[in-house]
Image (spheres, rainbow, N blue to C red):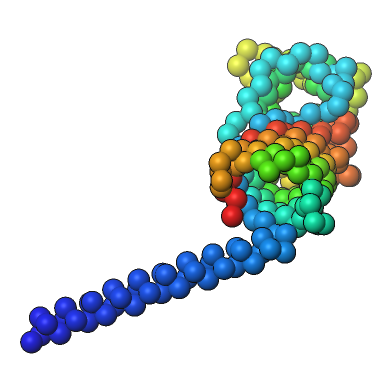
């Protein structure tokens, strides 16, 4: 009797689970169809950011870029698109993206404004001539708002502004094989030779809010699978307004490449 009772219990649980899943799927399908009937579409997307932060154009202080690595920077994004009119050619996109941006560079510079940490932990500010290795990485929530244009059933163009809220950031590195003129180009000379280096860290001077423009293309490869590419061009620098050690604005410029699922 106990075995029959347990079998009956598990059979009932299984039937309830199957019925619940079927109802949830039906409700989900009805919800998507209702959204489509009023011109609403949804998409989730995962991708990578490739690019860097740089002054535009390169200043005379930067004499040579020895190496550049974009590092691995990922993004996860959810978008909603509202289409207008009977033909639904034009629409508006609103999204939320969690992303990282970063790079590593090695450059030769001359009279480059710098604040380094000396051998005794003291901070020395002045003009650096020599090698500079830099690592930048930022994690942020980004809200894109874009006008969209549907070329055909598969191809869509997006263009509009975005605003990013940084949750974490790192801008640091070290200098090597060169010298620092304290305070100004004619100040006392501090030489770094052989394997001697001095570190720097401007992480606390990074902006919390960044904004810019993005423009991209979205291609529906299959019924639900999409492939996209977007250019993200920052309009304000990554450093705070009152930060004056680096004398030129560092703009974040990245290309986002991703795959998505359209509902």
Q: Left or right? Give the position of 72 relative to 163.
A: left
Q: Left or right? Give the position of 97 relative to 253.
A: left
In the rendered image, the vertical position of residue 112 relative to residue 193, given as above or below: below
- When asked about the image quadrant of residue 106, the answer is top right
Q: Quadrant of the C terminus?
A: bottom right
Residue at left 63%, top 12%? 194
In the rendered image, the vertical position of residue 208 relative to residue 101, given as above or below: below
Q: Quadrant of the N terminus?
A: bottom left
Q: Residue furthest front?
A: 86
Q: Residue furthest left?
A: 1
Residue at left 66%, top 31%? 50
Q: Nearer the viewer, residue 257 or 15?
A: 15
- When asked about the image quadrant of residue 187, the answer is top right
- When asked about the image quadrant of residue 41, the answer is bottom right
In this view of the protein, can residue 128 be seen by the observer?
Answer: yes
In the rendered image, the vertical position of residue 159 relative to residue 81, given as above or below: above
| x then y, percent, for residue 172 | 68, 34
Q: How many labels, in total?
A: 0
Residue at left 53%, top 66%? 28
Q: Nearer the viewer, residue 196 or 163?
A: 163
In this view of the protein, can residue 167 be seen by the observer?
Answer: no
Residue at left 56%, top 41%? 222
| x then y, percent, for residue 173 | 67, 30
């Amino acid at each position: 009797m106990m075995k029959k009772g347990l079998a009956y219990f598990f059979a009932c649980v299984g039937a309830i689970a199957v019925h619940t899943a079927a109802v949830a799927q039906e409700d989900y399908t009805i919800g998507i169809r209702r959204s489509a009937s009023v011109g609403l579409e949804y998409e989730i997307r995962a991708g990578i950011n490739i690019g860097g932060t740089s002054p535009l154009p390169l200043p005379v202080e930067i004499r040579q870029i020895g190496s550049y690595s974009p590092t691995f920077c990922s993004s996860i994004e959810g978008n909603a698109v509202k289409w207008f009119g009977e033909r639904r050619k034009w629409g508006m996109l609103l999204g939320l993206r969690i992303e990282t941006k970063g790079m590593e560079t090695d450059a030769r510079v001359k009279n480059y404004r710098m604040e380094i940490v000396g051998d005794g932990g003291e901070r020395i500010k002045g003009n650096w001539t020599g090698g500079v290795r830099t690592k930048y990485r930022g994690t942020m929530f980004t809200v894109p708002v874009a006008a969209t244009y549907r070329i055909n059933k598969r191809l869509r163009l997006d263009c509009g502004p975005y605003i990013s809220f940084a949750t974490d950031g790192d801008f640091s590195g070290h200098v090597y094989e060169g010298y620092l003129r304290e305070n100004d180009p004619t100040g006392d000379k501090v030489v770094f030779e052989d394997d001697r280096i001095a570190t720097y860290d401007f992480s606390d001077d990074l902006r919390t809010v960044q904004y810019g423009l993005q423009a991209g293309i979205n291609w529906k490869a299959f019924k639900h699978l999409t492939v996209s590419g977007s250019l993200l061009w920052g309009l304000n620098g990554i450093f705070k307004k009152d930060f004056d050690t680096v004398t030129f604005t560092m703009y974040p410029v990245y290309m986002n490449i991703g795959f998505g699922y359209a509902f």
